[in-house]
Amino acid sequence: MTVQPARSISAMAVLLAITACNKAEKRTMPSEVQIAYDYQLVLPDKFKRNWVQGIDSKVEEWQSSDTIVSTDFGQFSGPPTCHVASTSCSLSKEMIGGRPSLVGRYRHGPQERAHEPKPFRYFVHIPVSERYGLKLNMFARCDSEPACDEALTFFRRVRILRTERPGSGLILPDSPSSPPPVPG
């Protein structure tokens, strides 16, 4: 019988510690400068939007008759890589959206297509904010290599947007009060 009150006291102490931490965070939040990041990707009318929902990032998808274009804008997406089992893979560096970026080009063989709806895939990785680990990944899954080449031309025109007002994109705390101008 004496073990139960000890557990209750321990649980109460943990709860009070968590509550105290939450109150301290709430006091500091209003004084931080907030920066909003977003991007602008323009696609032709042949692409129709599919409504998708990301878990921890902004995710979007569009589809044409031969190409699926998708984006993942957040902190947890990684760059393209080539695997030993890939039939065809190449990586190259380019300046996209005013930032050094990595472009992966893949052609999947039949044995690799378990989770790939189309045989060609291009993957563009743009580091947006190194300080916060924010990245934009853009993907094209295509029926043909020329269709993916066309999608890459759209990716090369993406604009990274940064403003000091919240409301669009990802809000990041503790950012500088005067952001540099956005290239392009």
Image (cartoon, grey):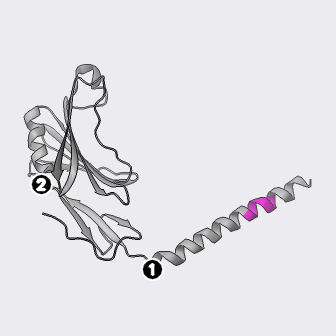
User: The magenta stretch spans which residues?
Assistant: 8-13
Name the one closer to the observer, 4 or 171: 171
Name the one closer to the observer, 126 or 44: 126
Question: Is residue 76 depicted above or below 132 in this figure?
Answer: above
Question: Taking 30 as reference, is 156 left or right?
Answer: left
The residue carrying mark 1 is 31
Which residue is painted at 45% across and 78% down in the image? 30
Task: Report the disc number at residue 157.
Answer: 2
Question: Is residue 126 depicted above or below 36 in this figure?
Answer: above
Residue 126 picture location, percent across and down: 25, 51
Is residue 11 one of those drawn in magenta? yes
The amino acid beneath tag 1 is: Ser
Label 2: how many Cα within 10 Å (few below 14, some 14–19, many 20+): some
Which residue is painted at 22% across and 60% down in the image? 39
Residue 58 picture location, percent across and down: 32, 55
Residue 180 picture location, percent across and down: 24, 70
What residue occupies the far top of the structure in this picture?
Answer: 111
Residue 170 picture location, percent across and down: 34, 63
Does the magenta stretch mainly form a helix, a strand or a loop? helix
Which residue is painted at 8% across and 51% down in the image? 44
Asked whether residue 59 is in view, the answer is: no
Q: Residue 14, located in which quarter of the rendered image?
A: bottom right
Label 1: how many Cα within 10 Å (few below 14, some 14–19, many 20+): few
Question: Taking 181 as reference, is 178 left or right?
Answer: right
- Upstream in the sequence, badge 2 or badge 1? 1
Q: Secondary structure at mark 2?
A: loop
Q: Residue 121, located in which quarter of the rendered image?
A: top left
Which residue is painted at 31% across and 68% down in the image? 36
